[in-house]
Every structure is written in C-alpha cells, then in structure tokens.
Image: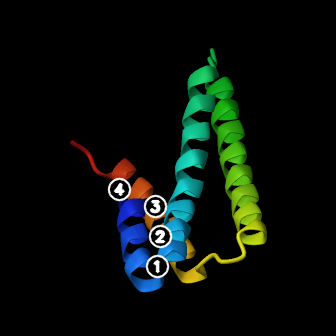
C-alpha cells in the first residue's frame, strides 16, 4: 500500500515515469521480502543452529536480490525518476520494519 501511495504522488509530480518508478521502488523490497519468507518456510531446521543457518541464508538471498534488482532497474530503465524510486524503496523498507515491531 505504501508503494502505491508513493507511486500516486510520483505520478502527480512526474507523470507516468514517476508512477512506474514508485511502483518499481516498492516492488524491489516486496519481492525480496517474499523470497525471504519463502526460504524460511522451505527450510525445516531441527536445531537452533539450523534455524540460524536458515535465517542467515534467507537474509543473504534477500540482500542479494535487493542489490541485483536495484542495479537492474537503474541500468535498464533510462527514464527512472530517482527521487520517487528511492523514496518508495525507503518507505517500503521502513513500513516492513515497523510492521515487525507493532504487536496486536
């Protein structure tokens, strides 16, 4: 939802390219978080050490995906609106971290 909000603001500010940049910026973190969750779900550790190994492996994949996606988008999409792209990325990172800290 936060990526859509930033994309909406980006579309008002920079038109079509601003909206697409906002969506792509949010999508980077969303896909990396999904990969993290899938790897945690697929790993079935039996010990505490196995749990930590699975979590570190999933985090490494998440960071790698983020770096590769940022590189790919910034090198292939020539009309990216950098301010909107990075604002959307940062907002989705902050929202996902805040969601972890909030308890029901």
The furthest residue to the left:
104
- Marks 3 and 1 close (CB-CB < 8 Å): no
Q: Residue at x 56, y 61 (%)?
A: 24
Q: Residue at x 56, y 72 (%)?
A: 85
Residue 35 image point, x, y percent: 61, 38
Viewer can see residue 4: yes
Earlier residue among tags 4 and 3: 4
In what quadrant of the picture does the C terminus appear?
Answer: top left
Earlier residue among tags 1 and 4: 4
- Marks 2 and 4 close (CB-CB < 8 Å): no
Is 45 located above or below residue 60 in the figure? above
Q: Residue at x 70, y 50 (%)?
A: 65
Q: Which residue is mark 1?
A: 15
Q: Which residue is mark 4?
A: 1
Q: Which residue is mark 2?
A: 19
Q: Which residue is mark 3?
A: 92
Left or right of residue 40: residue 65? right
Q: What is the C-alpha distance between the residues marked 4 and 3?
A: 9 Å
In what quadrant of the picture does the N terminus appear?
Answer: bottom left
User: In the picture, residue 81 is in which quadrant?
Assistant: bottom right
Earlier residue among tags 3 and 2: 2
- Marks 3 and 2 close (CB-CB < 8 Å): no
Q: What is the C-alpha distance between the residues marked 1 and 2?
A: 6 Å
Q: Residue at x 38, y 48 (%)?
A: 100
């Amino acid at each position: 939802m936060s990526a859509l909000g930033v994309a909406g603001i980006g579309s008002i500010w920079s038109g079509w390219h601003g909206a697409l940049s906002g969506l792509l910026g949010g999508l980077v973190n969303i896909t990396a978080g999904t990969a993290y969750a899938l790897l945690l779900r697929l790993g079935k550790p039996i010990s505490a050490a196995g749990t930590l190994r699975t979590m570190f492996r999933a985090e490494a994949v998440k960071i790698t995906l983020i770096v590769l996606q940022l590189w790919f988008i910034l090198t292939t999409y020539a009309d990216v609106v950098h301010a909107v792209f990075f604002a959307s990325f940062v907002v989705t990172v902050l929202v996902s971290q805040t969601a972890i800290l909030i308890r029901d």
